[in-house]
Image (cartoon, rainbow, N blue to C red):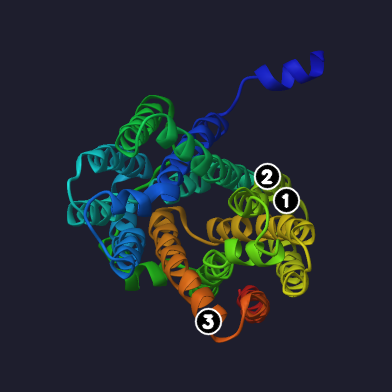
Amino acid sequence: MKIIKQKMFRPRETWEKNLIVLWFSVFMAGMAFSEIMPFMSLYVDTLGTFSKSQLNLYSGLVFSVTYMVTAVVSPLWGKLADRHGRKIMILRASAGMAIVLAMMGLVTNVWQLMGLRFIQGIFSGYISNANALIATETPKEKSGRALGTLMAGTTGGNLLGPLLGGTLASIFSYRVTFFITGGLLGIVFFMSLFLVHETDFKPAASKDLFSTRGVLKALKDPQMIFGMLLTTLIIQASNNSITPIISLYVRELMHHNGDVTFVSGVIAAIPGIATMAAAPKLGALGDRIGTERILTIGFILAICFFIPTAFVTNVWQLGILRFLVGLSDATMIPQVQTLLAKNTPAMVTGRVFSWNQSFQAVGNIIGPLLGAVISGWFDYSGVFLSTALLVFMNFLLFRVNVANKKSVRSRD
């Protein structure tokens, strides 16, 4: 017990203090972003009289417009982060989104809501800049554990968000829930303002680094970096391809009997629980045995888990395999961020992590569309098989990048 207390209350370096504060901040930010999603379409339905097709269209637009804008504006914020610091960017994002999300509780029609979702995309970037700050402030040999820990915070927030949002909406109302969400992001702003310290920031001094061409010249292996960005896109698309059909697949496995909504929620949450638990430990393991090795294992595991998911006969089998998929996610997403951190000069880290956020946003758009199309052409099982194929293609891309990276090192 004494040893545990000594470890918990020992003096901590600045990067460790930042990690603790930003873990809580990304947890609350992830919770705030995800807690409004379960009732967003229901909220849209209260803003007018719509046909079923109109409601589906408007709900889809309200959901996707934020990701579309995020994909476009993230590189701009990354450029400013490299000039002025990552802390100012997380303050900008948390303050802007606190105001915008609170204002969503005041809208009177769907176009106002869509406009605010558009603005929300403009103020995006809290989590990506938190990752960039940790990546630059943390010693490289410990960045895997640090980024894995941050990933666990984000995942935990995303998991609890829908549960909290549904509870708040049922106790209060949709509008009050938006006000509470804005308040959570306000707390994130003040935590970041007073408790996060950026001590090792070095602004990009050369004007050449303000352009994309200059950033590419600063990168030792730009092909590997862009390969990792594409890997991020495919991981996000793979994970989100399941989103449109998971509840329908559960309903089919339950033969339209029982509490399908509750079981679907549990099945949807299981991968995140596994990721949150495993990401920090796998990040630390990657620091010891090699990030590339952990990522390779992740791809192989994901393929092995997605294929049998297409052939399950009950929800228990589905739940177990989804848990295992969550473990494979913990070996992939944080490891990609770690590779970006370890292979990017500190003066352009903000730009590279903003590009990564853009690719994540594109994956969030492509994935659900891909799942919906494939399930329409084939059946639900086809979505899991096509996802396994997508992960396999991603694995081949990664191996090419690793081979190229070794070639660059040998030339140096």
Q: Identify the secondary structure beneath mark 3.
A: helix
Q: Quadrant of residue 211?
A: bottom left
CB atoms of marks 2 and 3 within 8 Å: no
x, y percent for residue 74:
33, 59
Q: CA distance from mark 2 to mark 3?
A: 38 Å
Depth check: 378 or 7 in front? 378
Q: Quadrant of residue 176?
A: top left
x, y percent for residue 312:
77, 69
Q: Identify the secondary structure beneath mark 1.
A: helix
Q: Is residue 262 above or below residue 307?
A: above
> Between tags 3 and 1, which lies in front?
3
Q: CA distance from mark 1 to mark 2?
A: 6 Å
**Residue 376 numbered mark, or none:** 3
Depth check: 409 or 392 in front? 392
**Sequence order check, earlier mark of 3 and 1:** 1
Depth check: 132 or 412 in front? 132
Q: What crowding class fits label 1: few (fewer than 14 Cα within 10 Å), some (14-19), or many (20 or more)?
A: many
Residue positioned most to the top: 2
| Residue 31 shown left or right of residue 333 in the figure | left
Q: Which residue is mark 1?
A: 282
Q: Which residue is mark 2?
A: 280
| Residue 22 shown left or right of residue 3 in the figure | left
x, y percent for residue 287:
71, 51
Q: Is residue 385 above or below residue 323?
A: below
**Residue 31 numbered mark, or none:** none
